[in-house]
Structures are given as C-alpha cells and as structure tokens.
Amino acid sequence: MDLTSVTITLPEGSNLILGQAHFIKTVEDLYEIMVGTSAQAKFGLAFCEASGPCLIRAAGNDDTLKAAAIQNAQAIGAGHSFLILIQAAYPINVLNAIKQCPEVCRIYCATANPVEAIVVETDQGRGILGVVDGFSPKGVETAEDVKARHALLRTIGYKQ
C-alpha cells in the first residue's frame, strides 16, 4: 500500500468541489444540477468510473475547466471520485443540490484554497483518504478580526 499526496491544479479564479459518488449516471446528474442551480456558472466536471471500462467521464459548459477537471481526475485516479471546477459562482451556490444528488456519497471539500488529495494505492486501485484544504491556523481571531469577518460577509452579500 502506498500513500501519495496529489496536488489539485486550479485554473485562475476557480473553485472546486471534490467528492465521491457511485454510479455512471453521476456525470449527467451533476451536469444537470450545475446548469439548473447556477445559470451563470462556468464549470467542468470529471468522474472516475470504478468498474466496467473504468473511464474518466466528463461534462461541462467550459472547455478549459472541463480539461482541467479531467487532468486532475487522471492525477487522483481514485475510483468513483468526482471533481467539479467552477468559475463565476461559488460552491455555496450549488453544494446543497450536489449533496442531494442520489449518487453522491460524500464531499471531501469545496474550496478555492490550494488542495492536496491524500490518495492510497493498493493492488486493486486508488482511493481518496482525505484532503489538505488550505493552510494551518496562524492564531485565534481577535475582536478586530471578528468585526472584519462580519463586514466581509455583509460586503459580499451573505449576511445582512
């Protein structure tokens, strides 16, 4: 058994959702969720099939994001994993709908931070054990940091 850290490469200005699902229909359902939930979002998605021909299935409405999703899926190479790369929207805009998709088993992360997928490889294949999402904490927020957080959420429209 080998452990590997796979760095996910994001095109500039992108967010990602990394998860696990269980059926070939995942690609079509995630595509429909993306176009139905966030009409302005540009996205590409890739799904690693874990049986039969074991292909990377892909869809999207942006060729660059679709190609990047495929490239990352190839690097991860874990059966039934999926990756959605998003621009012009945020994961929070689509995440609940994706979690409600019947094929989706888990979400590892949804972020714009640098991400490393921790992958295990056995004789059978590869699987994602978890992720490193962003960086370690540098301290505890102060009263000024709390004010700044509250102001940011109101500035970007997530709180009133």
Image (cartoon, helix red, strand yellow):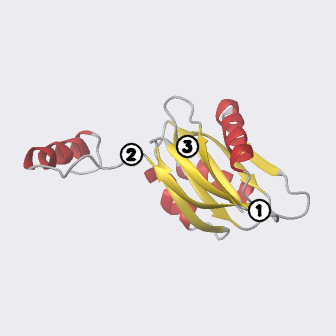
> Which of the numbered marks, if any, corresponds to residue 39?
3
Q: Residues within 10 Å of mark 1 (few under 14, many from 20)?
A: few
Q: Residue furthest front?
A: 1
Distance between the alpha carbons at the discs numbered 1 and 2: 34 Å
- Residue labelled with disc 1: 25
Question: Which residue is at a point 16% across and 42% down the rendered structure image?
Answer: 148
Give coordinates of residue 75: x percent, y percent.
71, 44
Kind of residue indicated by mark 1: Lys
Kind of residue indicated by mark 2: Phe
Please indicate whether residue 36 sits to the left or right of residue 157 in the image.
Answer: right
Q: Residues within 10 Å of mark 3 (few under 14, many from 20)?
A: few
Work out whether residue 69 can be spotted: yes
Please indicate whether residue 78 sits to the left or right of residue 5 in the image.
Answer: right
Distance between the alpha carbons at the discs numbered 3 and 1: 21 Å
Give coordinates of residue 108: x percent, y percent.
54, 59
Q: Is residue 89 above or below residue 27?
A: above
Give coordinates of residue 49: x percent, y percent.
80, 58
> Which of the numbered marks, if any, corresponds to residue 135?
2
Label 1 close to label 2 by CB (< 8 Å): no
Question: Which residue is at a point 42% across and 45% down the rendered structure image?
Answer: 134
